[in-house]
Image: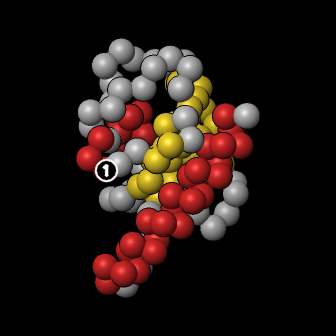
Amino acid sequence: MITLVVLKNPFNTNREIKQIKHIPGQSVFAYVQPEMMGHDEVAISRNGQIVPDSEYQSLVPMPGDYLAVCPVIAGSGDTGKDIARVIASIAVLAIAGWAGG
């Protein structure tokens, strides 16, 4: 099983915790994609470590892993987007650490 923690808003600690069947070879993106809530960008962590965007399609979690996902709320311009990504990343790390024990 994979534990998936979904944080729908980086400014709110409300979250959903789901147990999802592990599918060998399935990427972290495939696990979180149904939970992206209509957002083009999300921050993903695996076992408390932020997953770089470049690894979303290639990183394959193992049974027992914890994944956390949070939308990146778009700001104005590239600087706003960078700040939003940092906030989302911090939120994902905080929630992933809590969920993982």
Horizontal side of residue 29 vs 7, given as left or right = left
Q: Residue at x 32, y 41 (%)?
A: 56
Residue 25: percent from left, percent from top: 31, 19
Q: Is residue 47 visible?
A: yes
Horizontal side of residue 100 vs 60, given as left or right = right
Image vertical order of residue 89 relative to residue 47, above or below: below
Horizontal side of residue 89 vs 16, given as left or right = left
- The residue beneath circle 1 is 53
Residue 31: percent from left, percent from top: 41, 33
Number of marks in the rendered image = 1
Residue 55 location, quadrant: top left
Image vertical order of residue 55 relative to residue 84, above or below: above
Q: Nearer the viewer, residue 37 or 59?
A: 59
Q: Residue at x 50, y 17 (%)?
A: 63
Residue 60 location, quadrant: top left
Q: Residue at x 73, y 34 (%)?
A: 101
